[in-house]
Image (cartoon, rainbow, N blue to C red):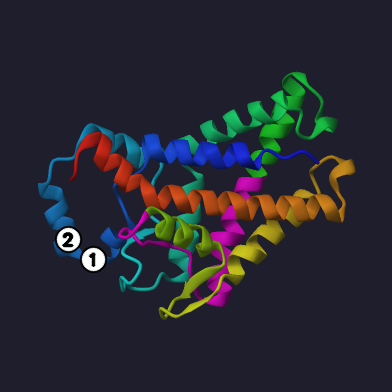
Amino acid sequence: MQQSWLFNALIVCLVCLSSGSAQTAADQASGTARKSEATKKPRHLEDKVLDLVVPNTLVIEGHDTRVAPLTSGQKFSQVSKNFFNPFTFVGIGIEAGFDQAIDVHHAYGQGAKGYFKRYGADIADTATGQFFGVGVYPSVFHTDPRYYRMARGGVLARGFYSVTRVLVTRTDSGRHVFNVPEILGSATSSAISRTYYPSDERNIGDFAYSMGSRIAFDAAYNLAKEFWPDVRNHLFGHR
């Protein structure tokens, strides 16, 4: 089965480079005093737009930062915030168009009918990936679904750190452990997708490829989370 995970990864990077968010989960955990201070600072237009387009509430500044753990309810709340976001549906529309152009899911056919089948499949992929990868498994295994930016150091070191976060995560208590939720979330989402993908894509090979592509996509997304603030400061000036 031909997949478009590389295109998806590039889309994520480009989105974050052109429309990342200035808001982080650290702001939520820092208390009323921090919120009061934030209200006094004028927010620039690009920041307001970026908060709408990509609400980046699952990023913590500093890989050694200590913050309060998220409750299960807060983890599932993040699922809805990330999914019910205007850009999610716009981005998926672009992805579905690209999939159709290169004939991913050939059995869906072409034309409007084929496009909407691909769009529906991509919506379902995103929903199950978020639900299990951010909500269910982090709650079951008591892990933190947030990304902790390294923020300092060389490009190679930070790049290596960011992509390996798909294999390493934190528990709610702050210990570093193998990222079981990432693996199980990708596997579960890929398994569910076999039920609505074309019948010729319901084999173990396609399942393995789909699972691997989802993990690779998340690694690319981590890269965007790590380096977007640097690019934003370069483009718009340091905040």
Quarter of the image for residue 208 reads bottom right
Whether residue 142 is visible: yes
Q: Position of residue 48 (x, y in %)?
A: 27, 37
Residue type, numbered disc 2: Arg
Magenta residues? 125-154
Left or right of 8 on screen, residue 195? right
The residue nearer to you, when weighing 52 against 19, is 19
Report crowding for label 1: few under 14, some 14 to 19, many 20 or more residues within 10 A (C-alpha): few
Circle 1 sits in a helix, a strand or a loop, which is it? loop
Magenta span contains residue 75: no
Name the residue carrying label 1.
Answer: 30
Disc number for residue 107: none
> Tags 2 and 1 in contact by the CB under 8 Å rule?
yes
Residue shown at 47% from the left, 53% from the top: 222
Q: Residue furthest left?
A: 40
Name the side, left or right, on which 37 lies relative to 51. left
Residue 56 visible somewhere in the drawing = no
Name above or below for residue 234 compared with residue 115: below
Residue at the (43%, 64%) spot, across then down: 74
Residue situated in front as seen by the camera: 52 or 219: 219
Q: Residue 84: x percent and y percent?
A: 49, 43
Q: Is residue 149 above or below residue 203?
A: below
Which quadrant does the C terminus fall into?
top left
The secondary element bearing badge 2 is classed as: helix
The residue that label 2 is drawn on is 34
**Membership of 144 in magenta stretch:** yes
